[in-house]
Image (cartoon, rainbow, N blue to C red):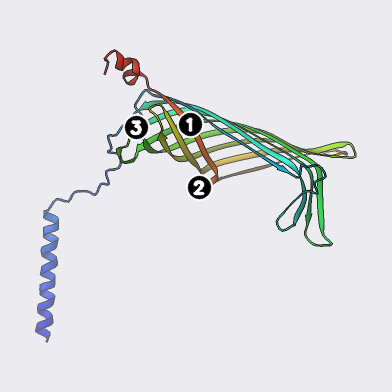
Amino acid sequence: MKRFITAILLMTSLTYGWAGSRKNSEPVEPFDRGIGKSTSVFVPKGTVAAGVNFSYRTFELGQNVDDPGFSMLFNLVNGLKGSLYTFGLAPHLSYFVADNLSIGARFDYDRTSADIGNAALSISEDMGFGIADYHMLKNTFSGSLTMRYYMAIANSKRFAIFAEARATGAYGESKTWNVQDSEKFGTYQVIRQGALAIVPGISIFAQDNVAVEVAIGILGINYSRTDQQVHTPVKIEESYMQNSGANFKINPLSIEIGTSFYFYTGPHSKRARKHGSI
């Protein structure tokens, strides 16, 4: 029995030794996924791209004559009368410094307005509160420097995914006010923000020069400071709030849908084709 075990151990050691010597003697190619080796040109160098994203939304609650008001959350909130609208406009311009790679600029304007004529919150039969004649207005302006890279899907000329890096600075003003007994008082805020973010998306060319693009933001490094003034019938109080952080996750509230126009210049322009430059 001892001889049998000794023979097995000897054969095992010889086998591993032979495999190790063979492994050391044969060259091994490094593993490579081939990412970045695609030669497909989705958007050529020298192209100018321009487009705009637009959004508009309105809400109307209990605006009919003699309307008792709208109810929500199983009548927890009732008697709602008011309106809300949001408006957003974001033009952008970029230039392709290399095939599939562009740098550019983007400007965003967002406006939100809300007017609540009446709203009541009923927690129980003996507990509740309400607000009336409440108004809010907020305007935000932001500018971004962008860098975007496209990668064609299966070497397609129509479909591609992209990743865009944005460095953004924003300035905004917000005010909320209420009127009671013919006196107006409320809160005024000045908002300053800065952010570095990654925005992936997909681009689909409907025509040679027109593409529909869908993008969704991934929260990156951000900083925000809000300076506040509270106006009361007696005095004015000042305070501020600031926050910062880094958080890379999908933000479903930042979905963008827009249209972009691509203008080919240089050897890829229609004039160059007409005169036989290419």
Could you tell me if residue 107 is visible in this image?
no
Q: Within the image, what quadrant is residue 134 found in?
A: top right
Q: Residue furthest front?
A: 65
* Residue 201 shows up from this direction: yes
Nearest the eye: 222 or 136: 136
Q: Which residue is mark 3?
A: 42
Find the residue positioned furthest to the bottom. Answer: 1
**Where is residue 141 shown, x and y percent of the image?**
61, 31
Q: Residue 250 shows which numbered tag?
A: 2
Check disc 1 and report the residue beneath it.
259
Residue that appears at 84% across and 62% down: 126
Q: Nearer the viewer, mark 2 or mark 1?
A: 1
Q: Relative to residue 124, is residue 248 depicted above or below?
A: above
The front one of 13 and 241 is: 241
**132 or 165, which lies in front?**
132
Q: Amino acid at mark 1?
A: Thr
Q: Secondary structure at mark 3?
A: loop
User: In front of the other: label 3 or label 1?
Assistant: 1
Quick check: 120 above or below 36?
A: below
Q: SS at mark 1?
A: strand
